[in-house]
Image (spheres, rainbow, N blue to C red):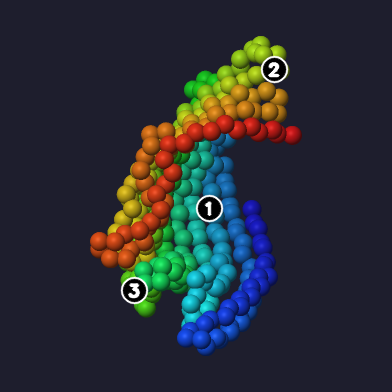
């Protein structure tokens, strides 16, 4: 399997800076023309087991920072080039009741886009630094009965910065630092239960659709300088729906255990850490229609 994409990317930037009554204008343009693609090879060891290998090439366009305060800040950050490889397998039992998937992967990014935080101006700007991530994933699905399905997954990702980035707002970024917002370990367990309800309120073929999902995530760095870690957390979500034809009305519950965790964080001093907390326990009702 192969794929190829070519992109023409154009960006413009304009700003007026004022300092002590003097005003300076700045205008810039960026052009990125690049090709990305992938090639994959799969092989059936048995009728139930496939192995595969994937090589891919990616690209992140150059751009401008959102919170520039001077012409110097207007300097664009570089484009990033991504090379990745993956080896994996997919297995399904003869009856299709049990499936197992696993993969090993490695990704190298030249001039990756990290975020630097300036605690003096509260501005966030992109930082170029090389990164490397490698790890493994394993997932399984078990159809216990026609109505009950159990799913689980675990992943390990070791993502590190591989080049120094001096002069960054908030402090220099050193090679060997962990990439922010990437936990070493994360996992997931789900229970899905579907049940035909027979005659109910005159609905055609009503069906109960239930999904309970439990997600666990370990600590992860808050910033590229690795000033501190955001704590891990466990999150429980629920979807309870009634299907009929192409319609579904459902109740949803998010973070039922009311876990307290941070979406992101920034460092000012050892005594001043800022960020954004995740949403607590919440619930709602929804409707969907498929056609």
Q: Position of residue 201 (x, y in %)?
A: 67, 14
Q: Does 246 appear above or below 68?
A: above
Please tell me whether mark 3 or mark 1 is closer to you in this view.
Answer: 3
Looking at marks 3 and 1 on the same chain, the residue that comes earlier in the sequence is marked by 1
Q: What kind of element bears circle 1?
A: strand
At 54% across and 42% down in the image, what residue appears?
Answer: 50
Q: Position of residue 105 (x, y in %)?
A: 45, 54
Residue on which the image places disc 1: 53
Q: What kind of element bears circle 2?
A: loop
Q: Position of residue 10 (x, y in %)?
A: 66, 73
Q: Does 80 appear above or below 91?
A: below
Residue at the extreme bottom of the image, as rendered: 22
Residue at the extreme top of the image, as rendered: 199
Q: Is residue 73 left or right of residue 196?
A: left
Residue on which the image places disc 2: 203
Please tell me whether mark 1 or mark 2 is closer to you in this view.
Answer: 2
At 42% across and 63% down in the image, what residue appears?
Answer: 132
- Separation of marks 1 and 2 at Cα, in angstroms: 47 Å
Quadrant in which residue 79 is drawn: bottom right
Q: Does 218 appear above or below 85?
A: above
Question: Dot 3, crowdedness within 10 Å: few (<14), some or many (≥20)?
Answer: some
Residue on which the image places disc 3: 172
Closest to the observer, 155 or 182: 182
- Separation of marks 3 and 2 at Cα, in angstroms: 63 Å
Quadrant in which residue 227 is drawn: bottom left
Q: What kind of element bears circle 3?
A: loop
Closest to the observer, 207 or 34: 207
């Amino acid at each position: 399997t192969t794929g190829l994409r070519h992109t023409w990317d154009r960006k413009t930037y304009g700003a007026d800076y004022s300092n002590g009554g003097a005003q300076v204008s700045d205008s810039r343009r960026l052009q990125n023309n690049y090709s990305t693609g992938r090639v994959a090879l799969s092989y059936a060891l048995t009728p139930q087991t496939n192995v595969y290998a994937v090589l891919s090439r990616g690209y992140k366009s150059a751009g401008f920072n959102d919170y520039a305060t001077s012409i110097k800040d207007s300097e664009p950050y570089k484009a990033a080039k991504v090379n990745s490889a993956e080896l994996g397998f997919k297995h399904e039992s003869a009856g299709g009741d049990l499936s197992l998937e696993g993969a090993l992967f490695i990704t190298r990014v030249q001039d990756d886009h990290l975020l630097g935080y300036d605690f003096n101006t509260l501005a966030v700007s992109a930082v170029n630094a090389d990164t490397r991530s490698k790890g493994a994933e394993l997932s399984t699905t078990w159809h216990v009965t026609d109505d009950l399905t159990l799913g689980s997954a675990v992943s390990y990702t070791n993502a590190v910065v591989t080049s120094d980035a001096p002069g960054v707002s908030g402090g220099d970024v050193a090679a060997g630092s962990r990439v922010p917002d990437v936990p070493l370990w994360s996992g997931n367990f789900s229970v899905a239960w579907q049940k035909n309800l027979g005659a109910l309120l005159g609905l055609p073929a009503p069906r109960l659709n239930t999904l309970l999902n439990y997600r666990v995530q370990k600590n992860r760095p808050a910033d590229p300088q690795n000033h501190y870690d955001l704590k891990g957390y466990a999150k429980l979500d629920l979807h309870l729906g009634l299907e009929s034809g192409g319609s579904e009305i459902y109740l949803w519950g998010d973070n039922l255990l009311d876990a307290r965790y941070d979406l992101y964080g920034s460092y000012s001093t050892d005594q001043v850490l800022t960020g954004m907390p995740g949403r607590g326990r919440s619930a709602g009702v929804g409707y969907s229609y498929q056609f």
